[in-house]
Image: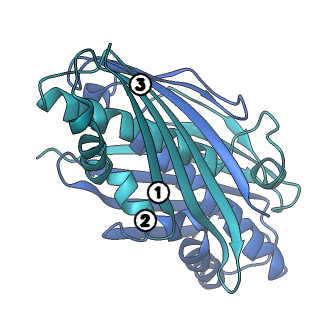
Amino acid sequence: MATERRAEVTWNGDLMSGSGSIDRVGSGAFGPLDVSWPARAEEQSAGKTSPEELIAAAHASCFSMALSHGLAQAGNAAERLRTSATVTFVPGTGITKIALEVEGSVPGIDEGAFREAAEAAKANCPVSKALAGVGEITLDARLAS
Amino acid sequence: MPRIERTASVSWEGNVARGTGLASGDTGSFSELPFSLPSRLNAESGKTSPEELLAAAHGGCLAMSIASELTQAGSPPERLDVKVRIVMDEVAGKGHLIVGSEVDVDARVPGFDEARFDALVRSADEGCPFSHLIRATASVTVRARLNAT
């Protein structure tokens, strides 16, 4: 069964000095969120989100769910996973890199098996597949000490 | 060209069927948004999901790309309204895939020439990095209407 998820965005004015808002999303979980070109394309984001930050959140959440599923299926359910995704955006070029980092609290698993499960989640989660065109997607997976 | 990095962090507790995650953007603009498998696959329930975050990302990306094209054409928009629907489906032999992104745009651009508008939207779609990427698994359709009055 297909699942649909919706978002609505408004933009006013030109790119450089105009501004936008992610007004609402179907679930109501967040919004409105302000967006602007300077917040997207300069080092300092001034507390505003950007498409790339939302992609980072989408990828980190998709990866985490896939990894928890894979670990549980192999008999090593995770107690806790802490994941971050960093998306690199080069204006004029596009998204050039995504770096995934995960630290897992997973009873009864060794480092090698955890890394293997994390690689499988990175390869198979739907967001990874949709973003397969990104030149470089890296993964750093380790167990919490 | 500057390289801009944007990071989001997620914590997940428990198994996939009954566990819950929390997603935060490092800019602080959103924090600890809950998500779960039921909120991802079933009816919308007040929790977000990876696909909803992608819908928001695609809307932001296309809005800026269209604003950029219109500005270069000498007519910055008064207002753009962009609605995005991301569709995920189970595909035989491939598991769950993001199969579609359906975008509706209403553009208010006083005096803009209707005949130039469709081509402009097409090049904005081509210029949006996210549109380009998700064509790996998804069909992207953009329907745009111009209000030039």
Q: Answer with the quarter of the image where residue A112 lies.
A: bottom right
Q: Which chain is blue?
A: A
The structure residue drawn at horizontal position 78% and vertical position 50%, both measured from the top left corner, is: B36
Residue identified by numbered label 3: A48
- Above or below, A32 against B10 in this view is above
For chain B, what colour was chosen?
A: cyan
- The disc numbered 2 marks a residue on which chain? B
Name the spot of residue B52 as percent of width and height, x first.
62, 44
SS type, badge 2: loop
Calculate the distance from the C-alpha at mark 1 to the C-alpha at mark 3.
26 Å
- Above or below, A71 against B105 in this view is below
Residue identified by numbered label 1: B140
Q: Earlier in the sequence, mark 2 or mark 1?
A: 2
Q: Nearer the viewer, residue A38 or A138?
A: A38
Amino acid at dot 1: Val
Q: Are marks 3 and 2 in contact (CB under 8 Å)?
A: no
Residue identified by numbered label 2: B135
Name the spot of residue A32 as percent of width and height, x first.
56, 20
- Above or below, B72 against B84 in this view is above
Question: Is residue A5 something that shows in the picture?
Answer: yes
Query: Which is more foreground, mark 1 or mark 3?
Result: 1
Calculate the distance from the C-alpha at mark 2 to the C-alpha at mark 1.
7 Å
SS type, badge 3: loop
Calculate the distance from the C-alpha at mark 3 to the C-alpha at mark 2.
27 Å
- Above or below, B18 against A115 in this view is above
Q: Nearer the viewer, residue B36 or B43?
A: B43
Question: Is residue A42 something that shows in the picture?
Answer: no
Q: Are marks 2 and 1 in contact (CB under 8 Å)?
A: yes
Query: Which is more foreground, mark 2 or mark 1?
Result: 1
Disc 2: CA contacts within 10 A as few (<14), some (14-19) or many (>=20) = some
The structure residue drawn at horizontal position 60% and vertical position 63%, both measured from the top left corner, is: A63
